[in-house]
């Protein structure tokens, strides 16, 4: 550069390109961690301060350490909230990030109950009360289909609390039949035998004493390599963890959107808002991205790497 002192990199176009480069590499890091694993989508919709309908997309998956991960993927402006419009937006998003529908599992339940069996217990309790609480029971029955209820009850048999006291091999065999695409016919024939061996093994293993939730069980399976000894059981655990039962992550996305797009910045474009949200919400992932990757992505916009200031955009809590 002939006049490096004038290279302040303060043009709005440069700002947007730099934020986009940061967002792209942050998302690429998330997709690399996802790999070819199963995932579920958590979707919700809200209007921003400029009264535009925005659909938030969050993915949920179990990483290689057995940890349940929820990551922001995108905020997408949708013209309407009809099923066809939302499906088109999701299809476009899948094509953009190279995600396969074959790896998509489960479905989201806005405000659903705990997966570990409390739903069935609560329903039984309500049935004992009668009177006005019958209305609540009717509402729960309308929200949860018979199939969904059976799915939740069967999954509760994986609960590790109290020395796996809820374990029921027959119900878990039925659970495998809920996921016919993920368990071959031969595997469904072998799963009962593996379940019987698994429960004897973990009940006698001191490493599994005191585990109180399914997430901790998955991590302990990975640590002790029992996921390789009992692959069919671990697959059930993984599928159970993918079942979405809350929308807290999406609600946090809404809060972040209101921080990034305010009344004073109500003309911010959809792409710039999405890029800003990706970096802001997933700041822990962004902080792990190597600067060189961001520089390479930024240089693809036609800006020389020698002209790039390597300091990252500031992140505000």
Image: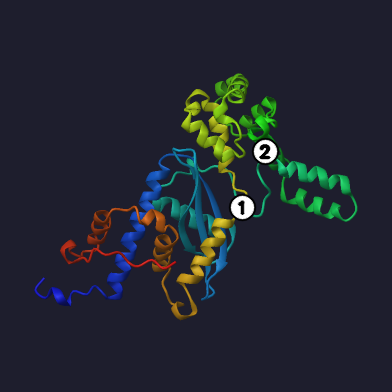
Between the residue at mark 1 and the residue at mark 2, the CA separation in whole angstroms equals 16 Å
Quadrant holding the N terminus: bottom left
Residue 246: image tag = 1
Residue 189 spot, x, y in % from top left: 60, 20
Residue at 29% of width from left, 72% of height from top? Answer: 13
Q: Are marks 1 and 2 in contact (CB under 8 Å)?
A: no
Corner quadrant of residue 211? top right
How many discs appear?
2
- Does 68 sit left or right of 273 as displayed? right
Residue at 54% of width from left, 56% of height from top? Answer: 249
Name the residue carrying label 2.
151
Residue at 69% of width from left, 29% of height from top? Answer: 171
| For residue 157, above or below residue 294 | above
Residue nearer the viewer, 287 or 276 = 287
Residue 88 spot, x, y in % from top left: 50, 56
Residue 148 spot, x, y in % from top left: 69, 42
Quadrant holding the C terminus: bottom left
């Amino acid at each position: 550069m002939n006049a490096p002192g004038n290279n302040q990199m303060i043009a709005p176009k440069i700002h947007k390109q730099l934020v986009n480069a940061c967002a792209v590499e942050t998302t690429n890091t998330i997709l690399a961690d996802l790999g070819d694993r199963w995932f579920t989508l958590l979707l919700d919709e809200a209007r921003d301060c400029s009264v535009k309908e925005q659909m938030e997309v969050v993915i949920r998956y179990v990483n290689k350490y057995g940890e349940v991960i929820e990551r922001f993927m995108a905020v997408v402006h949708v013209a309407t909230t009809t099923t066809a419009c939302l499906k088109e937006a999701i299809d476009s998003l899948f094509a953009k990030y190279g995600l396969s529908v074959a790896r998509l599992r489960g479905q989201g339940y806005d405000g659903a109950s705990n997966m570990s069996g409390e739903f069935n217990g609560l329903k039984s309790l309500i049935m004992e009360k009668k009177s006005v609480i019958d209305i609540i029971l009717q509402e729960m029955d309308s929200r949860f289909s018979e199939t969904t209820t059976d799915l939740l009850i069967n999954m509760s048999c994986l609960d590790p609390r109290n020395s796996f006291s809820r374990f029921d091999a027959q119900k878990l065999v039925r659970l495998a039949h809920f996921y016919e695409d993920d368990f071959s016919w031969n595997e469904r024939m072998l799963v009962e035998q593996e379940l019987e061996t698994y429960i004897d093994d973990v009940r006698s293993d001191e490493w599994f004493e005191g585990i109180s939730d399914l997430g901790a069980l998955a991590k302990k399976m990975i640590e002790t390599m029992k996921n390789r000894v009992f692959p069919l059981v671990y697959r059930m655990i993984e599928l159970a963890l993918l079942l979405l039962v809350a929308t807290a992550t999406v609600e946090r996305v809404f809060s972040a959107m209101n921080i990034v797009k305010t009344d004073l910045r109500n003309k911010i474009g959809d792409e710039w808002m999405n890029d800003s949200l990706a970096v802001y919400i997933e700041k822990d992932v962004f902080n792990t991205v190597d600067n060189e990757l961001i520089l390479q992505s930024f240089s693809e916009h036609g800006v020389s790497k020698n002209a790039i200031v390597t300091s990252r955009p500031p992140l505000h809590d």
